[in-house]
Amino acid sequence: MTARAKKYASSTDVARLAGVSQSAVSRTYKPGAKISEEMRQKVLAAAAQLDYRPSLIPRIMLTHKSNLVAIVIGGMYNPFYSAVLERFTVGLQEAGNQVLLVHVDSGHSLDAVIPKLASYRVDAIVSALSILSKQSADELARFKIPVVSFNTPVRNEWVSSVCCDNVGAARSLVELYLARGGRRFGFISGPPASPASAERLAGFRLGLAAHGIDNLAMAVADFRYEGGHAAALSMFAGPDRPDALFCANDLMAIGAIDALRRTYGLRVPEDVLVAGFDDIPSAAWGAYELTTFVQDGQRMVDEALAILRVAAASHGPVGEVAIEVPARLIERQTTRRQPI
């Protein structure tokens, strides 16, 4: 009976074929290690012949660093998250890290994936999703690696947050609506547990309250097109219809616009002002020309990567870092009407 062929060549196999020591093989693949060019070429030739690829596992065990960064993803139906994922991936790879994608079945929170994260040997965790509870933040802190998430309400010495100024943005929208003749207001929210949606609602209420307005029609959806469509159908079914509607993200706003036009025959913006949040590509499409806020994903990613660099340089926690990035209003056709 013949011995079963090995699936992968080892560094010992390469050393034997090249006629060098195993440490010479290790030095060949270690950046900055001292090795003669002649010996290096012997090792590389033997490695090519055996189709050898060095394993990261021994280095991870020796240095306790993998150069792997986990990106927790979810809600990929939303183009904003797709763009953020690409920016994180490019930025991390440019910094010499490799990316490990970990999926969670949520469009707003990474809490449910924490047990799975515990089984990976990663150097950091980043996500555009929020951490919702102190308990979850404490569990992540026990990993003793830097964690950076977007729009998260809880932090500790290992867990940091980069936030969009959701409150300030939503509050400023009230001024635009009043200037465009809005008098009856509505809000379509994301899931109740979403911090970003809650902050946008809070800011909208604050803006209304500053003008003595406390009447706000409400509907709860799920950040998806279909949810915004259904919420608008419900909100506008009765006689007291809003004439200024704010949706917690663009997908729901686009769904709402289609519902208002197709089912109720309402004109946007003549009958109803509509605005969203995120400035996804379809917001600028000619069929919608949606007024929205730019949640500056590139800057938010850059700020998150800067936190990771500080943590890597200090070899420890960076403290309860909280960075707020302004949102920028882009007014398009869905709010461009003359006040009555």
Image (tube, rainbow, N blue to C red):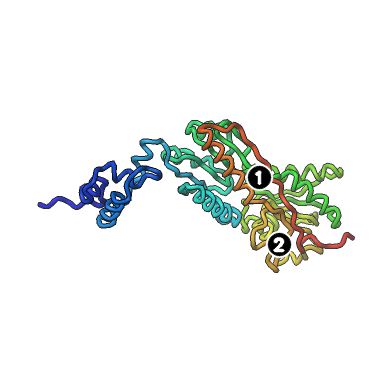
Q: Amino acid at mark 2?
A: Ile
Few, some or many C-alpha atoms within 10 Å of disc 2 (few <14, some 14-19, many ≥20)? many
The residue lying toward the viewer, choosing from 229 and 45, is 45
Residue 13: in sight, yes or no? yes
Toward the viewer: 84 or 241? Answer: 84
Q: Position of residue 26 (x, y in %)?
A: 31, 43
- At 25% from the left and 57% from the top, the residue drawn is 49
Find residue 30 and report its horizontal and vertical position in percent. Answer: 37, 44
Indicate which disc, 1 or 2, sits on the residue closer to the N terminus: 1
Q: Nearer the viewer, residue 29 or 236?
A: 29
The residue furthest right is 340
Q: Secondary structure at mark 1?
A: helix
| Residue bearing the label numbered 2 | 257
> Callout 2: helix, strand or loop?
helix
Marks 1 and 2 in Cβ contact (< 8 Å) = no
| Quadrant, the C terminus | bottom right
Q: Mark 1 and mark 2: span between their CA atoms?
A: 22 Å
Query: Disc 1 or disc 2, which is closer to the eye?
Result: 1
Q: Position of residue 56 (x, y in %)?
A: 36, 44
- In the displayed structure, does residue 334 sit left or right of residue 38? right
Q: Nearer the viewer, residue 153 or 141?
A: 141
Q: Is residue 340 left or right of residue 324?
A: right
Q: Dot 1, crowdedness within 10 Å: few (<14), some or many (≥20)?
A: many
Question: Residue 25: horizontal and vertical position, in percent?
Answer: 29, 46
Q: Is residue 236 visible?
A: no
- The residue that label 1 is drawn on is 196
Q: Is residue 276 left or right of residue 4?
A: right
Label of residue 9 in the image: none
Q: Amino acid at mark 1?
A: Ala
At a point 29% along the width and 56% down the height, the residue shown is 48
